[in-house]
Image: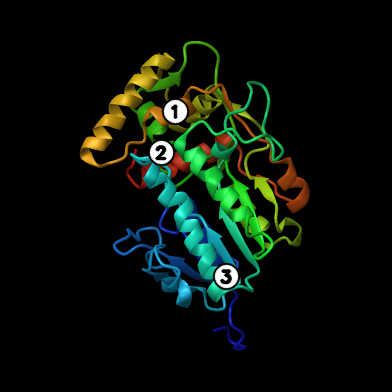
Amino acid sequence: MQLNDTPLPIAVLTGATGFIGSHLADLLVQKGYEVRCIVRKGSNLQWLKDKPVACYAVGLDSEDALAEVLTNANLVFHVAGVVRANTEHAFYEGNVTTTQVIINALLKYAPNINRLLVVSSLATTGPAVEGQVVDEQTPLKPVSLYGRTKLLQEQLVQQYTHQLPITIVRPPAVYGERETDIYQFFRTYQQGFLPIAGLWGNKQLSMVHVSDLVAGIYLAATSPKSVGQVYFIGSEKQYTWADVAHATQLALGKRALAIRLPHWSIYLLGAVAQVVGRVTGQASILSIEKAHEMTAAAWTCSSQKAITHLGYKPLVSLNEGIAKTIAWYKINKWL
């Protein structure tokens, strides 16, 4: 309680133990919210440890189990999702079924919330044509199981826009402190190698530092203009992997040997990793599905709608963001 006994506004968050969710939890605390985190039993709470947040180990399997955590909630942020899995069923359960549970729980226990903010992905839209960007009007053509189940998630959510105030955001590639996937690129570079997908050209991408992303997510969740809307929250500029490599070179102070991987080799590696994942029961970062995404010419999107509607403004340049990220990896002995 505050000194004047006025209760803090309440923000409920899924996925708070992960990369994006933990940074969003930090921002919500800074903004003066009582932060409630829905977590699974046995979750690794390393990014929430010693922070003024309440963790409810109820998971996302039962709408009735969410009754307490949703009591008097003002904002609900659904960040949790499955980004890698060995089966279509696992993707569907993690991205669609859990979303249905949250919606059912909100309709039952918190029908008067101010906003449900759902974090989707650029993967929902699919890759862009080289030299162009996708926007919120682009037809949705996902190329992976992840993207297809995120599309199903969006379609599910949009069925309830007449019953709940809902906003969807679609981040592109997200990097920053605590991130573990793009981190593999930095780790490989630190070891002296620069992997490049494809023998010709330089693939294009939108990237956003996690601090800019969560600031955009917060704007989308609190703006009266954003009810029922979808936004890309990314960078104003589009980059190439050469830009990323140059920023990494500046941050690490060293060059790396470029190794170009033909597309067939990426699919081969993805197939092997997928088989190993199914045998071991551990989903790999690389798979045939991921190869579909890695071999696309461009993953670029426009954030202009968020800039115009919400006043969104990415503040972290690529060079600054990668320098901050690598510095964090070094401090935490990841590099």
Residue 253 numbered tag: 1
Earlier residue among tags 1 and 3: 3
Give how far across and how far down residue 192 sits, in percent: 35, 22
The quarter of the image holding the C terminus is top left
For residue 304, side relative to residue 300 (left or right): right
Residue under the image location 21 percent in, 36 percent down? 279
For residue 39, side relative to residue 281 (left or right): right
Residue 107 numbered tag: 3
What SS does tag 2 mark? loop
Residue 181 numbered tag: 2
Q: Amino acid under label 3?
A: Leu
Q: Report the residue that reaches farthest toward the left.
A: 280
Give how far across and how far down residue 14 sits, in percent: 47, 60
Q: Amino acid under label 1?
A: Gly
Residue 22 is at least partly visible in this image: no
Residue under the image location 37 percent in, 64 percent down? 49
Give how far across and how far down residue 110 sits, in percent: 57, 74
For residue 45, side relative to residue 116 (left or right): left
Mark 3 Cα within 10 Å, few/some/many (few <14, many 20+)? some
Is 332 situated above or below 45? above
What SS does tag 1 mark? loop
Is 155 situated above or below 284? below
Total number of numbered discs in the rendering: 3
Q: Amino acid under label 2?
A: Asp
- For the residues labelled 2 and 3, the Cα–Cα distance comes to 35 Å
Q: Nearer the viewer, mark 2 or mark 3?
A: 3
Residue under the image location 54 percent in, 40 percent down? 321
Image quarter of residue 190: top left
Earlier residue among tags 2 and 3: 3
